[in-house]
Image: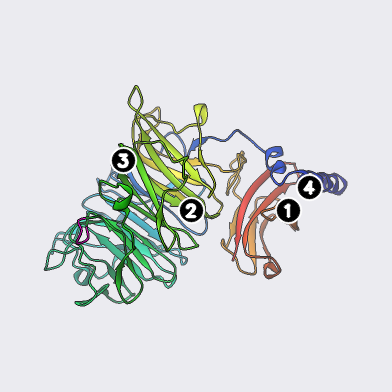
Amino acid sequence: MNRSTRNLLICTMKKLLIISAFFFVSCLSAAAQSWSEVGPLSNPFNSQINVLATDHLGNVYAAGHFYNPNTGYEYVAKWNGTQWTELGVGTNALKPNYFITTLATDLSGNVYAAGNFYNTANNLCYVSKWNGTNWTKLGEASLNARNTINMIGLDANQNVYAAGRFRDANDKSYVSKWDGTSWTVLGNATTPLNGNGDILSMAVTPDGTVYVAGEFKNASGDYYVAKWDGNNWTELDGTVKSYNGTAELRELAVDASGNVYAAGFSTSQDRGYIAKWNGTEWTEPGGANVLDVHSIETVAIDPSGNLLVSSFKRNSGNGVELVHKWDGTEWTTLGTGAGALPSNKYFVLSLVTDPSGNIYAAGEFTNANDKNIVVKWNPDGVITGIQDATDRIVRLYPNPAVDQFTVDAPEAGYVMGYNSLGVQVLDLEVNAGANTFSGLTMLSSGLYTLIYHTEQGSSISMKLWKE
């Protein structure tokens, strides 16, 4: 593409952006919005996928009941934009003796896994850490988890938190924190969690605030969300029971504004229900236009702060599994008809997003070859992320970024950047290979769309979060 053609394109796009902040996305659209399988049809998942995680570079991780047929062991799989690979092989393999239920990643590239697998020498479940080379156990003796670890989470200081079905000597569930040296229980004799049931869900904020919920109840017999503020455990006032919740709380999520979302229970009308805690009271998103589903399976928050949920709704057949988005004003369903999730029979067990806003779902559902799969929703309906239609990789990192970022491109071209209003704020020349740009401090914090154009005319849209 020559300079004059490029300038014409820039001018044209600027005019279009004035008309609509979103029109340029539709001009570059490669396909209608739909869910698509991540990876080839010959993907490695020969059984159920329990959990997904993403890192700050956009890599996707999956784990569950699937296993390596050559070794017989479950494992953690990594999608790098091109292929699925196993984290750790041979002497560096994880080799769990049972399934994996939870994953987490940190900004240093470490991956953490836990579940129902245990050390046969002491029958203790443990958290294992992948440092890019091998798996190591994190102090299993001081964690003392004698049953399944349902959830792990991390704060900004890379402290690891674990909770689940394991109990203390008083048969109470607890949350434990790994500070890099040892595990310590959150709370003491005067401020215990006093969990009289299993912990099924946990959310950890960057500052180390921890929220947990599950099968435990308060003195009134109501399920509730417990909050650890660094010193004490407290119950979020006005229990979700007051909104007719009749079962345990299986899912939690916290957005950047501190709103807490709890889900997994049903109302007396057999309707799936999600409750939002805004610091003062519990309400149901949607008001008069609430979700009409029979159960809510998973919840997540995307980079823009939207709430995502997967649900199950019975119909005249087996029922249908759907993913919905709450943007603060209305509920929308992601994918219908030909663009819907690839199965109408099996549950979504995990729902996550990456820094670019792409959404990934996995669980019990399979493809036409009866393989369990990870599926991806592209929020813009364009070729988004680190791969274009010709399988050439474009990498954008670090993401989030503070002052500088790098575009690693397969060929020379240029990058144009737009803020959330569609106003162009960047116009950068790129060469083949790694190109590092600085000066982001002049931009406001928020989400930006970067569009990489090759000299041959193809385009790839990516999301960059500026801190």
Query: Relative to the observer, which residue lies in front, 262 or 78?
Result: 262
Q: Is residue 150 left or right of residue 287?
A: left
Q: Nearer the viewer, mark 4 or mark 1?
A: 4
Q: Which residue is mark 2?
A: 59
In terms of sequence position, does the residue under pointer 2 or pointer 1 come before the other?
A: 2
Q: CA distance from mark 4 to mark 2?
A: 34 Å
SS class, disc 1: strand
In terms of sequence position, does the residue under pointer 2 or pointer 3 come before the other?
A: 3
Q: Which residue is mark 1?
A: 416
Q: CA distance from mark 4 to mark 3?
A: 47 Å
Residue shown at the point (70%, 52%) measured from the top left? 421
For residue 18, which numbered disc appears in the image? Answer: 4
**Image quadrant where residue 370 sits:** top left
Q: Are marks 4 and 3 in contact (CB under 8 Å)?
A: no
The span picked out in magenta is: 217-221
For residue 48, which numbered disc appears in the image? Answer: 3
Tell me if I can see residue 238 in this picture. Answer: yes
Q: Nearer the viewer, mark 2 or mark 1?
A: 1
SS class, disc 4: helix
In terms of sequence position, does the residue under pointer 4 or pointer 3 come before the other?
A: 4
How many residues crowd mark 2 within 10 Å: few (<14), some (14–19), many (20+)? some
In terms of sequence position, does the residue under pointer 4 or pointer 2 come before the other?
A: 4
Residue type, mark 1 in image: Met
SS class, disc 2: loop
